[in-house]
């Protein structure tokens, strides 16, 4: 017996008699508790509230039971699986496009009525009354969105993109894809966007798409007995991940009517794992979205959609015959890119600061959440209604393409307080929906339409309001605010350059939006395609590429992607693809921590219960006594969920003996081990066992993953990360270099690769930081986490 | 000592005295030779000739020497690396766009002169002379292309996409990226395309882009002392792979002026490994291409490019104001997709059959290669010149957008044999360059421009000629032939439907090209974007998506992607992402074969030489005697290339002792272990050692990868494939389940995952096939391989 095992790895093995395990089981010492909990479970802010999160597991659990189940699958099951994959994608595309359409229709109708009523009052010179109606309706809409979010589903707050991105990276959180969240997200997003807050609908659409995908994959609610047998193949993390990826692509496709952009967005920004087959399915999903949306818009063009009409589904159409540009036009575009990068990174910086403050305040209670939202709504109403008074009235152009000034409805030339025959250019964009503002900014019409001061006021207002509004406890996206802010800044630059450039002001608006998107969101190909699909002009391509490349490069010098920052603030342990340089200097043995809990191949029920109750680990190595030597042998890894499933069935053995696979099949069905959503998992505390049962035995062999991935303890952390990340593991077993020692040294989980865990792992590691390596997320995470 | 090791694994370990190794070393028994060679080295047809191929290795080789080298890298080195990455991408983009531009210019000039001369002769009614000039010039151009390819660089034959795709999957072949191949590919492609053969230039452009990328990464030629110190970080397979991926994206971007399409093509079709950072670099590369091409075209529009003018760089511009289509237009589009899928898969089927026949004939000698090319050239000339006589002359439309009939140059309305005021519509497309034919077919002009019979003749001609022409021993792409064939079929359907459809004939041509591309190449997003960028009309998007989805789905029911088939015919061991179902039923122990060669940590030089000479393996497990037991311990894996580097330096030890890392650094530099191109590797036969040296020792420890990836022998092949493929391994060590046996059971390489290897691995496996699972590649591979 190697009693001389080095101190950091407090493993006990070789306990030939099973009873001794309870005695030698190392209880978590106080000093270890914090880290031990950290490494298996953690808390993150999901939406608005802190929740426990859990890792997903993409490993093929190869135990005898599953292998047998797999062998019994015939051609029909394989056909069912393939058929369902495509059917689900079709259904996801269909539902997401319907929701997207309905969403736009509702926003246009609600906001349209609101602006029509206030505009008519303005025409009658009842300015005070108009403001009252405007601000009260905004306040009520905001209040409604906040109250349903805070009380019914806090997970629906925010854009949801960070949560979905974290899910696709392998971090599950309860309730992010529940039906309740879906409903709140849809209704809340409509009401928040209609309330004239500077928030977007694209982010919520991504979350809605993912929700729909996840719910379809789950096959209805278990509670209401709506599960379908054909869906049983989707009850694992891998297939669910693929569905959610397709759903997020469909969300962007529906929000911007950009099917190719949606696929690329899912690929570039959302997905952490991707394969060619998934590309095709995502493409199919967004194609369904595109086709259904086109058909619905056809209906609307014939005037059957009320106030909806041309608006709503963004299709900015900045096309102006043949845009011609030459090398001389490149320098201003470069400048635009640089400035976009700088203000984009500044935007990220400020947004994160504001989010921190909000999170700090939100901890104090729901009333504070409502208070902040109301304050922002009132502040927004004041600005939107008050600022146009600063702008001077413009005479209507004689060749205006539409009625000028606009009467009654939300058009391009708002009269606001102006005398007849004049319009207020600031009101045209600020006292309007964001969609209409973008359309006006991108419009190819006369250069003189907007004044320089108007653009400046609008840019500053949008910049500030969008930063303040994103953090409210309601569904709120970032895309549209960033586009509208960027477009105003771009047009500002265009007006400033005046006759020094050949490019039109509308093109500057498009490029400004591109540069600000690039500076804040840091995507490249997907943003490029989304902007092309929005503006419907492929000739812009080289210019948009230049702007995006420059703004991303400049902004990357200051800070990271906005969604990554938000994830860090929320506390999601996001696993990067690339290893930090210091990870090459450390071995896996350096980071693995805490005492290890082991099971024996044939284990006493009482011991299993004890292990499950005293730890929060989700995987346990299973060891067997070696037949020909005194050392023990690693048999495999068993999951907590499977242990609980075994305990629930209570098919215990009275004597310690090996169970055949056929016996296992008699007692259990594949459905018992199906992966459930995070909210529905059974807890060990719910299982009641008699003292007699506690003395019985379980043969874990048929249910143990007999070929877990293992790495040797001397492997560098960077190299282990490659395996962990590329294959998508939840547990990675570490085996000793010298085989005569205990068969397993420890288990690596996601948290062991997190910089803050590595840095907390011992004073000796701090010195690595003196190598001048920055750990960006570290500062983000050491802030006080909100109470769970 | 476990002398009772099971028979299949003939490992000898525990030889405490090093001399005994040579005695107990198992020589390759005759029955094992074939399979043993198969599993470490293989032959594939690269371009036109069979060459030995080798696997690439993307694993981080973590030996003490590299670790030490890595530790010494400071911030300056990291900066150098990042700076070089971007500089190289910039250079790749710049050179590829220049080559693409030059390529088009040359083709347009040569073909333009040829058509101008023959057209003028036709005007003078000297028809016989015209045919003679036409056919002889075609023959000479073809002959030139074939001769330089066959004699100078056979690797330049064909499109090169299968070779590049195989390289990006991890299969290296000599000469595919050599400067010689690059030159032959450029010159040969120009001359083959100019010779009126139905071959494309896009495929060769992809190969050219990859070549340029690889050469830049290599940093010039070692032979001429042109290597640059800053490039030393790129001397590994991972960085070279990234560069080649960017190069292939740049190739498509330059061929079609489709920067986003190029990135997506590289992502969807070419790359086997992909990460977000690479997306950005590929995007940067294609942005450089797009910007430089635009600048060069600006120059050409001002008329400084001779016959080039508007032509050449395809920019088909099928835009016709506002295309409006409704649900009623969808059924014909569906039909188009279905037919496109069927003829696409038929095309693949026939092309593969023809390629097989060609490969069989080509084995007989270069003279046969030249003969086939000449035959096809003469046949093509006959068809192109003869078929237009079948078409009736059309009166020129009164509102023709250009001169009708065209005089002298290659225009839309060829007069051919027609009387003045008339044109020959078949000659306009068939007696023309492929680019002009596509432009004419996509053109938005009058519906009456082409007759039904013309389209049918043209379609059949292109279909047959493109199948026959692809296999010639000269650079020849598939994209343009497929587009031109598909467009003619699409326009045929459009004419056939007549007034039953609202869509224009040009739109049918575009959709036909899309459906045929989808049916043959089976890409989705990338084809969609390439077609959009070609036609410059985003409104087509939903229709193109429908067509592509349908044609791919239909065609997938019959056979696979054309490039995958070509790779199979050529014999490249392409590693798929997904595991075949039968792989879940087998363990890795089932497929691992042959006796295993082991090295000891401190090994005699003579033994190393013997192992290297008697085997063709590229990695050897290194074992150490365990200090505290009689069993031995796996220390790691050493690569053949590193062993040869050690032997070359002759820094041997006179006694068996451990070497410190510092000693290792004194004798060796990182450059000694830099990965070289396949053509430049040293061979063990080239190293001369005295008998005295053969008796000395080498300490392998500092150079051994001490943490290779390992899997347990009971893991299923499917699960091992996930690790092997996702991480990109060359060697995967299999360790025994019971630790007291020998420390390593075998090594898995790429060939062990190939269906034909698995099926040849034992009679017991054949029964798996009776489960009804098809092995598509099996039939493709069991054909007689050409002699090396």
Image: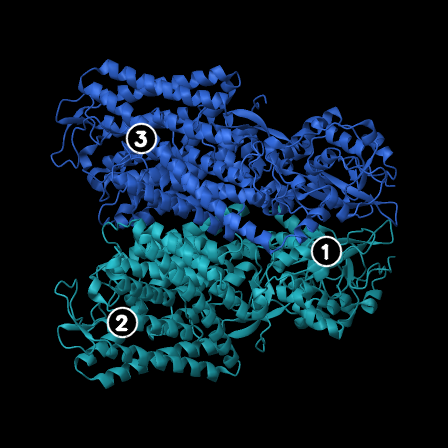
Chain colours: A blue, B cyan
Where residue B720 sits in the image (x, y, percent)?
66, 54
Q: Secondary structure at mark 1?
A: strand
Where residue B392 sits in the image (x, y, percent)?
21, 75
Where residue A241 sits in the image (x, y, percent)?
54, 42
Classed neighbour count for the residue bearing mark 1: other residues with Cα under 10 Å, few (<14), some (14–19), many (≥20): many
Subunit that carries the residue with mark 1: B
- Position of the N terminus of chain B by quadrant: bottom right
Where residue B711 sits in the image (x, y, percent)?
70, 52
| B205 w.r.t. B431: above or below | above
| A123 w.r.t. B505: above or below | above
Q: Which residue is mark 2?
A: B454
* Residue at the (57%, 55%) spot, across then down: B577
Subunit that carries the residue with mark 2: B
Q: Secondary structure at mark 3?
A: helix
As drawn, the label of residue B734 is 1
Q: Quadrant of residue A384?
A: top left
Q: Nearer the viewer, residue B9 or B19?
A: B9
Instruction: Say whether residue B472 is left or right of residue A691.
Output: left
Q: Nearer the viewer, residue B403 or A777?
A: B403
Q: Are marks 2 and 3 in contact (CB under 8 Å)?
A: no
* Residue at the (64%, 54%) spot, across then down: B718
Subunit that carries the residue with mark 3: A
């Amino acid at each position: 017996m190697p009693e001389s095992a080095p101190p950091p790895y407090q493993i006990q093995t070789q306990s030939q008699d099973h009873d001794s395990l309870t005695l030698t089981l190392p209880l978590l010492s106080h000093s270890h508790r914090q880290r031990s909990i950290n490494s298996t479970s953690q808390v993150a802010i999901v939406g608005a509230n802190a929740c426990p999160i859990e890792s997903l597991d993409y490993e093929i659990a190869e135990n005898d039971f599953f292998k047998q189940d797999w062998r019994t699958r015939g051609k029909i099951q394989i056909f069912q699986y393939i058929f369902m994959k495509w059917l689900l994608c079709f259904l996801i595309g269909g539902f997401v496009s319907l929701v997207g359409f309905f969403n736009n229709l509702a926003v246009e109708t609600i906001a349209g009525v609101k602006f029509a009523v206030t505009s008519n009052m303005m025409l009658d010179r009842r300015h005070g009354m108009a403001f009252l109606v405007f601000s009260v309706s905004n306040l009520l809409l905001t209040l409604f969105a906040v109250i349903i979010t805070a009380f019914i589903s806090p997970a629906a707050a925010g854009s949801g993109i960070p949560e979905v991105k974290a899910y696709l990276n392998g971090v599950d959180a309860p309730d992010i894809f529940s039906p309740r969240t879906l409903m709140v997200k849809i209704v809340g997003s409509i009401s928040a966007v209609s309330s004239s807050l500077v928030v977007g609908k694209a982010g919520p659409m991504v979350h809605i798409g993912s929700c729909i995908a996840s719910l379809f994959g789950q096959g209805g609610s278990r509670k209401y007995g709506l599960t379908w047998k054909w869906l049983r193949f989707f009850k694992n993390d891998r297939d669910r991940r693929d569905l959610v990826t397709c759903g997020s692509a469909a969300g962007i496709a529906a929000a911007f009517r950009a099917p190719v952009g949606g696929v690329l967005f899912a690929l570039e920004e959302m997905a952490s794992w991707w394969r060619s087959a998934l590309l095709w399915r995502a493409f199919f999903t967004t194609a369904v979205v595109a086709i259904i949306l086109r058909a619905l818009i056809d209906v609307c063009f014939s005037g059957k959609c009320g106030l909806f009409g041309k608006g709503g589904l963004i299709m900015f159409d900045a096309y102006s015959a043949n845009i011609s540009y030459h090398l001389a036009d490149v320098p201003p575009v470069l400048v635009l890119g640089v400035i976009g990068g700088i203000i984009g990174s500044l935007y990220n910086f400020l947004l994160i600061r504001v989010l921190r403050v909000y999170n700090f305040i939100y901890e104090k209670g729901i009333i504070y959440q409502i208070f902040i939202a109301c304050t922002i709504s009132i502040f927004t109403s004041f600005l939107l209604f008050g600022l146009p008074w600063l702008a001077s009235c413009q005479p209507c152009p004689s060749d205006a393409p539409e009625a000028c000034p606009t009467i009654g409805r939300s058009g391009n030339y708002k009269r606001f307080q102006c005398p007849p025959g004049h319009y207020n250019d600031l009101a045209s964009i600020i006292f309007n929906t964001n969609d209409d503002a973008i359309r006006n900014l991108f419009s190819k019409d006369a250069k003189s339409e907007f004044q320089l001061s108007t653009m400046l006021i609008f840019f500053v207002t949008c910049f500030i309001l969008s930063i303040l509004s994103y953090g409210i406890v309601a569904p709120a996206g970032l895309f549209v605010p960033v586009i509208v802010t960027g477009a105003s800044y771009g047009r500002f630059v265009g007006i400033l350059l005046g006759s020094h450039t050949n490019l039109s002001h509308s093109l500057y608006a498009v490029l400004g939006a591109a540069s600000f998107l690039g500076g804040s969101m840091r995507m490249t190909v997907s943003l490029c395609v989304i902007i092309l699909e929005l503006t419907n002009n492929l000739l812009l391509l080289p210019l948009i590429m230049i702007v995006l490349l420059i703004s991303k490069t400049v902004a990357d010098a200051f800070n990271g992607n906005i969604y990554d920052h938000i994830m860090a603030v929320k506390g999601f342990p996001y696993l990067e693809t690339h290893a930090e340089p210091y990870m090459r200097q450390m071995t896996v043995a350096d980071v693995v921590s805490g005492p290890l809990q082991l099971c024996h191949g044939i284990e006493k029920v009482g011991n299993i219960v004890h292990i499950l109750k005293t730890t929060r680990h989700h995987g346990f190595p299973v060891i067997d006594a070696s037949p020909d030597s005194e050392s023990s042998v690693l048999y495999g890894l068993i999951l907590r969920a499977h242990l609980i499933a075994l305990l629930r069935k209570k098919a215990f053995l009275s004597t310690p003996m090996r169970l055949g696979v056929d016996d296992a099949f008699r007692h259990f069905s594949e459905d018992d081990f199906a992966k459930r959503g995070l909210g529905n998992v059974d807890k060990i505390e719910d299982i009641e066992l008699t003292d007699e049962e506690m003395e019985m035995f379980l043969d874990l062999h048929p249910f143990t993953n007999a070929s877990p991935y293992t790495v040797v303890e001397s492997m560098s952390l960077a190299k282990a990360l490659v395996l962990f990340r590329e294959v998508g593991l939840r547990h990675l077993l570490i085996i000793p270099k010298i085989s005569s020692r205990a068969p397993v040294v420890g288990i690596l989980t996601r948290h062991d690769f997190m910089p803050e865990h590595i840095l907390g792992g011992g004073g000796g590691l701090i010195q690595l930081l003196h190598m001048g390596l920055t750990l960006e997320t570290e500062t983000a995470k050491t802030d006080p986490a909100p109470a769970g």
